[in-house]
Image: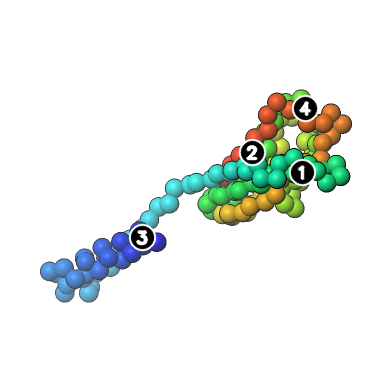
Amino acid sequence: MLRKFALIGAAAALVAGPNAALAESGTYRIGLTVGLNCTVQHDLSGYGQQSGDEVTLGELREYCNAQHGYALLVRYTPGSLRGTVIRAGDDEVVLTGSGEAVLSRADGPRVRERMLSATPGESGFDARSIEFSVIAA
């Protein structure tokens, strides 16, 4: 917001300068480039609460300003978590043991917070690590 006012102020100063008569016949084009920024944060609020077979893993906060959207990936120890279902809000994926899976996709820029939960497969939670990342499309 501050940048917008600074750009408007700079444009006004150019028009009001000593050559104001020339400014009436000219055109000013001001552009701004915003860098790509995609992040995900995993908050452990509510971690470990259980409802039936489902276990709460906390909350995900996603932010991505990519014009064409993004994918939310879950990465885990290869060979582990086979059959585990990971859920983020209404999206879910069944893990195959590959070490990586797409949990959800967004078709444009988005900011959202979603509860994260899992239903363990036959081997339970046998992974050494699990991570979430956002990849711009």
Which mark sits nearer the N-terminus, 2 or 3? Answer: 3
Give the alpha-carbon distance from disc 2 to disc 3, as whole Å: 33 Å
Residues packed near mark 4 inside 10 Å, few (<14), some (14 to 19) or many (20 plus): some
Residue beneath disc 1: 49
Q: Nearer the viewer, mark 3 or mark 1?
A: 1
**What amino acid type is highlighted by mark number 1?**
Gln
**What amino acid type is highlighted by mark number 4?**
Asp
**What amino acid type is highlighted by mark number 2?**
Phe
Give the alpha-carbon distance from disc 2 to disc 1, as whole Å: 20 Å
The part of the image, by quadrant, that contains residue 135 is: top right
- Residue 132: image tag: 2
**Quadrant containing the N terminus in the rendered view:** bottom left
**What amino acid type is highlighted by mark number 3?**
Leu
Residue beneath disc 4: 126
Along the horizontal axis of the image, is 125 left or right of 6? right
Q: Nearer the viewer, residue 40 or 79?
A: 40
| Residue 103 appears anywhere in the view | no
